[in-house]
Amino acid sequence: MSENDIVIEVQQLNKSFGSLHVLKDVDLEVKESEVVVLIGASGSGKSTLLRCINFLEINESGKIYLEGNKIDPKKDDLNKVRMRTGMVFQHFNLFPHMTVMENIIEAPIQVKKMARDEAIRIGKELLGKVGLSDKADVYPRMLSGGQQQRVAIARALAMQPQIMLFDEPTSGLDPELVGEVLEVMKALAQEGMTMVIVTHEMGFAREVADHVVYLDQGRVIEVGAPDQIFENAMEERTKEFLSKVL
Amino acid sequence: MTFWELFIETMPGYKDAVIATVKITVLGLIIGMVIGLFFAFLKVSKFKLLNFIADIYITIIRGTPLVVQIFILYFGLVHFVDLGRFLSGGIALGIHNGAYIAEIFRGSIQSIDRGQSEAARSLGMSYPLTMRRIVLPQALRRAIPPLGNQFIIALKDSSLVAFIGFQDLFNRAQRIQSATGLAMESYIIVGIYYLLLVLVLSFIVSRIERYLSKSERGLT
């Protein structure tokens, strides 16, 4: 049953913004518990690819399968689909009018109709996991960027998703705060969470990724194990990109 | 008769006029808020037809004088339905202010970072739920200062209902003037009443503003 192990399958995906063709015939495959890191220059389409996977952007052509089911954005209830794909954003996007705990329990209560006590219990557990147990009743503005991003991760996890998508989770952070967020993500990977990560943290990619996907101008140029990509890239363009960022 | 004598003498009679002005302004603002929120939703909708409908409403209402709208609802409508002075005036004020309030709400809704609704949608929240729980609570806070401003304008504009014979502050002033012949004194006195009401309203709005901004600053 190896087919069932594929949690995300993207086939021949195309996406344009107006006349800008951002994704060109992109294929991507992510198996259960795998961590796939998307790398590439800005404008290469990696964030757009991530946003297509949970349908924040709707692709023009191509197919997206999640957990074996083909998702049709016109027919399927995308809210249900998104419940199963947690997303973490570059700018955290915490809800400023809610406390940390309220941020976390909002969707479980409103969407899953979970009992408040149960949601809070899960919320406490998750805050413990991201090391912010003492911040439950604080408003997001009082937290550092790293703390906010860890709350955002806890908020996404509270919906108990099958897949976690990270869109440059550390790009908006001061350098000294990057580590604490990467630690949480590493722990998550070790627990077997299926993750797709867009990042510029090459050291992290190398350590945590099962596969690294290099995109350039909307195309997948190369896919491989981190060691292979970072040390022995087949494609000239990959080498060139890595020589600039490493 | 001196200014002060007139002021003191007319004070008891002004009580009902103050109440009438407050009542018709409140009615107008309640209607205006409902209409405003409704058309703001149409304006931020992705459906072009709904945007268009909202644009037509706002263009017509903002493009015609309030006094014309009041007269249409009172004198014009009387052949079909007699709403009476209070309802005609209050509804006209509501329809008029609704157009401005719609633009205030639209602006405040659109000022909320897209990341907020994206985060909510990514958690599986539907569009209406995202609006109600995430976008609107933040947008309403941002709308308070311009709304307060619009409330003050509405309060002062309510004086136009005097021209359909509704016995509000301004109507009262006109009567006092014609009874006493003291034009300057009569209108300065009514100006003072309006000013006092505006000050009270500003105070209430600033308190609400302060109360609501607390949590967003993280002070609660």
Image (cartoon, coloured by chain):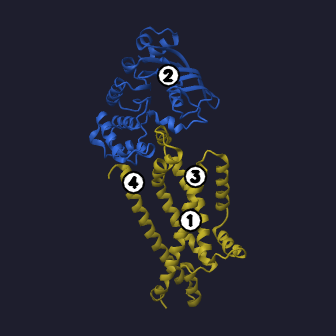
Residue type (three-letter) at the residue carrying disc 3: Phe
Q: Are marks 1 and 3 on the same chain?
A: yes
Q: Amino acid at mark 1?
A: Ile
Q: Residues within 10 Å of mark 4 (few under 14, many from 20)?
A: some
On residue A41, the disc is 2
CA–CA distance between discs 1 and 3? 16 Å
- The amino acid type, in three-letter code, at marker 4 is Ser
Task: Measure the alpha-carbon separation of dots 4 and 1.
Answer: 26 Å
Q: Are marks 1 and 2 on the same chain?
A: no
Kind of element beneath mark 1: helix
Which chain is represented by yellow in the image?
Answer: B
Circle 3 residue:
B41
In depth, the one of B123 and A144 nearer the eye is B123
The 10 Å Cα crowd at callout 2, few under 14, some 14 to 19, many 20 or more, is some
x, y percentage for residue B3? 47, 86
Q: CA distance from mark 2 to mark 4?
A: 40 Å
Taking the spot 39% from the left edge, 26% from the top edge, the residue there is A193
**Dot 2 amino acid type:** Ala
Disc ID at residue B74: none
> Disc number at residue B31?
1
Q: Nearer the viewer, mark 1 or mark 2?
A: 1
Look at mark 4 in the image and give the residue it sits on: B213
Residue B98 position in % (x across, y down): 58, 61
The image shows residue B117 at horizontal and vertical percentages of 49, 42
- Chain letter behind tag 2: A
Determine whether the residue tagged by mark 4 lies in a helix, strand or loop: helix
Query: Alpha-carbon neighbours of circle 3 within 10 Å: few (<14), some, or many (≥20)?
Result: some
Q: Position of residue B113 (x, y in %)?
A: 49, 43
